[in-house]
Amino acid sequence: MPSTTWADAHGLCTFVDASPSPFHVCATVSMLLTGNGFTELRETDSWPGEPGRYFLVRGGSLIAWSTEGVGRTAPFRIVGGHTDSPNLRVKQHPDLSSAGWQLVGLEPYGGAWLNSWLDRDLGISGRLSVRAGNAVEEKLVRVDEPILRVPQLAIHLSEDRKGVHLDPQRHLNAVWGVGPERRPFIDFVADRAEVPADAVLGWELMTHDLAPSTLVGTEQDLVSAPRLDNQGTCYAGTQALLAAAENPGDHVPVLALFDHEEVGSMSDRGAFSDLLSTVLERIVLGRGGGREEFLQTMAGSICASGDMAHATHPNYPDRHEPAHHIAVNGGPVLKVNQNLRYATDAAGAGAFALACDQAGVPLQRYVHRADLPCGSTIGPITASRTGLSTVDVGAAQLGMHSSRELMGARDVRAYSDALAAFLTPTA
Ligand code: ZN
């Protein structure tokens, strides 16, 4: 019997298992928001002038905010994150056969740690574009059956028994059966989505590991799950927004979750798009403000860009900056990079450190080794697109970009508490 259980970590597991694709992240967050009094707005409609709790979805991105109890020109407090995670995605002509096997052609999305996708029972999720008369409709689909598997080479067949180099073109196709040619894979997916196969006009389909998320360790103080980068932030950010909406201050709390971070953010809905700045301006305009008020509001606003951080790895401590030890269950992480791979400056650091202090959680400070290239995230992009003061933050994890990642169970609550305090600064 574990000595402790962590309610928020269980919530994260449920969230991740419900969200195998960016589109499903948006659906899961939408459900949580709707259940807490938020109303979905469409970009093609005019927006209500009265204060309230609102959100919108653009593809795999979502922005939510609450103007309840907040003045008309109140500045924004924004928590950012990303909905996408590296994985293997289905090609346009996926049906292949080789050596008597029937295969589904896959290719990597983002910087997937390819070895981690081998020998796992995989399902499929994403969205279909479906013909409906003379229109095209979107249909979410998920198949949680173990239909696909990317089999590893036997160690006896590798050249030196030290493992094989994985070629993303040749070695990542999934088997889904043997024997004579099957019906097209997309027809199978259409069947599961309950749409006619000949009505499917386009798709974004991706694989997911079917092993459920779980707490691990004798004290159950670790979370083992896929997609913690960056659903750890999507979950904590959503919890933070819900808390902030219940406790209005003198800022408008905003949650901004973007698709396509793992591939550079350049899309209609990525952090490089106009999505965030358009929504923020429409919030001000919708409440009767003008461009001048919008710009004034922006000048007093600040963004915490949330993305997962590297905990110091026990088997590879030499890969980490020795004076910047990062512990799981050690509290949220402030990410600083002198070459602006992270957007954090002293002003942003001050705002987040104060929020951690007010939330009563410890703060850790991350710096990448100076002799290793540092990853990046949406912070520098939203900062340069909007001019908002920005701070890059996260929660510590191991195995980033593996199909299965590991973080601290206690960090889930600490992270969402810190983000909630950031969204509702007290004067
Ligand atoms: Zn990330």
Image (tube, grey):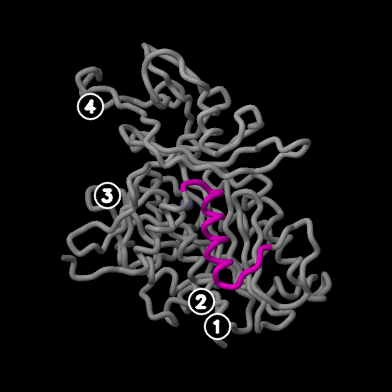
Mark closer to the observer (1, 3)? 1
Label 4 and label 1: CA atoms lie apart by 56 Å
Residue type (three-letter) at the residue carrying disc 3: Asp
What residue did someone put label 3 on? Answer: 318
Q: How far across and how far down the image is residue 346, in percent?
A: 52, 70
Which badge, 4 or 1, is on the more N-terminal residue? 4
| Disc number placed over residue 247 in the picture, else none | 1
CB atoms at circles 3 and 2 under 8 Å apart? no
Residue denoted by label 2: 243
Q: Alpha carbon of mark 3 to alpha carbon of mark 2: how far? A: 39 Å
Can you give x and y, in whole percent of width and height, for residue 342 in the image? 51, 57
Query: CA separation, marks 4 and 3?
Result: 22 Å
Q: Considering only order in the chain, which callout, 2 or 3, is on the residue closer to the N terminus?
A: 2
Residue beneath disc 4: 162
Bounds of the magenta segment:
20-40
Q: Is residue 393 left or right of residue 166?
A: right
